[in-house]
Amino acid sequence: MATYKEIRGTSITAVDSDPTNVTGEIFYNNTSRALKGFNIGAASWSTGGSLGTARYGAAGFGSEPAAVGCFGYGPTYGVATEEYNGSSWTAGNNGSTTRYQVYGCGVLTAGLVSGGTIDSTERNATEEYDGTNWSAGGTYPAARRLIALAGTQTATMGAGGSTPTPGSPGVIYYDAHNQYDGSSWTSSTAMPGTRGFAKGIGLQTASLVVGGNLGPTAGTVTNTTLEWNGSSWSSGGTLAANLATMGGGGSQTAAIAFGNTTQCSLYDGSSWTTTTSMSLGGDSSAGTGTTTSSAGALNFLRRPSPADNRKATEEFTGPAPATVTIDTD
């Protein structure tokens, strides 16, 4: 970044009021008689409203200020749904299939969950939410827990997942990849390697599968990212740490991933950058949202200790341009 001495003598625009934010622009404000510019402010997490029911392993979809948290465990397997309006959670109508360790995708008025488990019995049921009620969707091709889901209610990508096995190794991970059209699932190109407990982000034809456990058995937690472009898989950027059962959201070129620890990272389409940490760690499979300041991410329904922290919500505000006055002394 240039210093004032380095730019002194350079012609700049003089205006009577601050213009629309343009990152990196420098101008002179005639009214305040100040040399100013735009800078990108720091990202932050803040405390949001508390959930009514403490759970973990739940599903989430939407973004702040219109999000859904549903299903999960605590202290029993549940079907409860809660909706967030930017400040508080309210109870919605219950789903039908009890489950936890389940992901969701979509928005508050058109969301979807699929898979999950209860007492080591894996689920293949898909349920769709319209902002008021749940209804049955197409059956997932195989019963799996923590399938990485990305997309919308009528155009979804589902990848990977896991099932338990008696004794050693205990868990099997899968490379299966399926596509949903709003009524049925069909098989698509398998991932390059088995993976479970990963987070799906983006759209059906432009998605990320982030972190998770690599198999096929006794999985090793990874920091790698896979990208799907609608026809083939490729490798994306790597996280700063190996993480699984994360929350996150956004798009293939502007994503956020957080949880498992207090770590939070932002993706620009090629690399991950660690940003401001959360206050509370723990599994964050229900966490959802975007990277922006106007519709940020939510970290909720996770598994920290003590259990009451499972009701806590943290809200993410992404980096945003801000006007700054340049010291000319």
Image (spheres, rainbow, N blue to C red):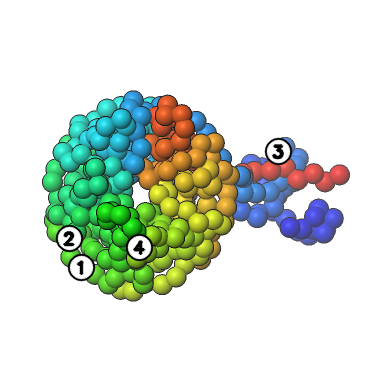
Give how far across and how far down residue 161 sits, in percent.
30, 57
Task: Name the element at disc 2.
Answer: loop
Q: Nearer the viewer, residue 6 or 27?
A: 6
Q: Position of residue 228 (x, y in %)?
A: 36, 67
**Precedes in sequence: disc 2 or disc 3:** 3
x and y percent of residue 115 in the render?
A: 23, 51
> As shown in the figure, which amino acid type bears the numbered disc 1?
Ser
Q: Which residue is mark 4?
A: 217
Which numbered dot is residue 141? 2
| Among numbered discs 4 and 3, the one appearing first in the sequence | 3
Identify the mark at residue 187; answer none if there is no mark: 1
Question: Could you tell whether 221 is left or right of 96 in the image?
Answer: right
Q: Could you tell me if the residues under marks 1 and 2 are in contact, i.e. CB atoms within 8 Å?
A: yes
Q: Where residue 31 is drawn, which disc sits there? A: 3
Question: The residue under label 3 is which amino acid type?
Answer: Thr
Q: CA distance from mark 3 to mark 1?
A: 63 Å
Q: Nearer the viewer, residue 212 or 70?
A: 212
Task: Give the total number of marks visible in the rendering.
Answer: 4
Could you say whether the residue bearing mark 1 is in a helix, strand or loop? strand
The quadrant of the rendering that contains the C terminus is: top right
Q: CA distance from mark 4 to mark 3?
A: 67 Å
Residue occupying image coordinates x 41% and y 57%: 212
Give neighbour class at mark 3: few <14, some 14-19, many 20+ (Cα, 10 Å). few
Tell us which disc is closer to us: 1 or 4.
4
Q: Residues within 10 Å of mark 4 (few under 14, many from 20)?
A: many
- Image quarter for residue 75? top left
Pointers 3 and 1 in contact (C-beta within 8 Å): no
Q: Which mark is residue 57?
A: none
Q: N-terminal of the two: label 2 or label 4?
A: 2
Helix, strand, or loop for circle 3? loop
